[in-house]
Amino acid sequence: MNFTRIPASPDAGAMVLAEIRAMQSEPPVLPADADLTALLPHTGGIPGTWVTAPRESAADEVSAYGVTVYVHGGGFEYTNPHLEQVMAYRLSQVTGRPVLAVDYRLAPAHRYPAALEDVVSAYRSLLAQGVPASRIILAGESAGATLVLSALLVLEQTGDALPAGALAISPQTDLTLSSPSIDANDGQDVINRAVLDHVRTQYLADARPDQAPQSPLHGDLRGLPPLLVVAGSKEVLLDDARRFAEAVSDAAGTVSLDIYDGMPHAFHASVVGADPLPTAVTLLRRVREWSSSLAVQDHAS
């Protein structure tokens, strides 16, 4: 496992929280050069939004540069379209690919496995329309990161071609709520055990929390594509990220774990600001470097 601790100034966490709170009253604005043109005829019957940032070089076919599939957070039951569009734009910038933001079904009206089925269906629709799996990246944040990891387990089990890699920011990987950091970081984060218990209940309904794919940590982690797992050191989900990365490494997988000092849950949202803070700039740079390494690996193969 490639582990990297990302240092931060003493006031960095407070600055990030202040910026995120400001977004609640003044939603982020999608840059004027964002292209929202749909690039493929369908997305497998699953609603979604295409967002493309300007690229250094154009390609005639989507299969030539690939797609980043973005799965938003929100505890499996909320969506924030303004923030998510800008997040998709940032992901397009750093991965050099158009982004398909998947509008999966939300709990409690649609409980497990509805959201997971939607993510898998959207991914399969790209394959069916000729996008090579080696040109696809899955990226998710919070609940969306959980769905990304769950989708990988489903795709591996069913024999589907796996994507080039997956980015999981602040995933909840163990829905039994057994990670020590849930209590150790209580009071330092913006969420707590009560929030996680609510999320679990709304999402799972009658499904067991100690089984995969809904709890990715409890699955067979062999054969997964390269992963970048990200978390903040003050997150109650810190050990969900760490335990999962260690388990993937133990299963002979390729995984990088980035821990950002002093950062709470949802710190990644600061990347949508018009003038991103230093922590956000570092996160975007790390994702750019990681996604570029996937392209090199694919080219070499």
Image (cartoon, rainbow, N blue to C red):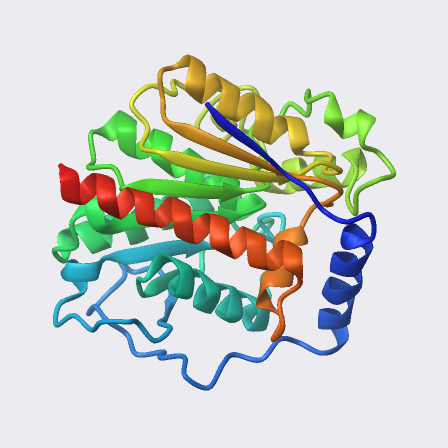
Q: Residue furthest bottom?
A: 32
In the displayed structure image, the side of residue 48 where residue 60 appears, left or right? left
| Image location (x, y in percent) of residue 98 | 31, 65
Instruction: Count how many numbered circles sit on residues in the image.
Output: 0
120, 248: nearer the viewer: 248
Q: Is residue 164 above or below residue 78?
A: above
Q: Residue at x 67, y 52 (%)?
A: 267
| Image location (x, y in percent) of residue 10 | 82, 47
| Image location (x, y in percent) of residue 30 | 52, 79
Q: Residue furthest top?
A: 250
- The answer to whether residue 193 is visible is yes
Q: Residue at x 32, y 43 (%)?
A: 293
In the displayed structure image, the side of residue 20 where residue 252 appears, left or right? left
Q: Residue at x 33, y 32 (%)?
A: 154
115, 94: nearer the viewer: 94
| Quarter occupied by residue 230 | top right
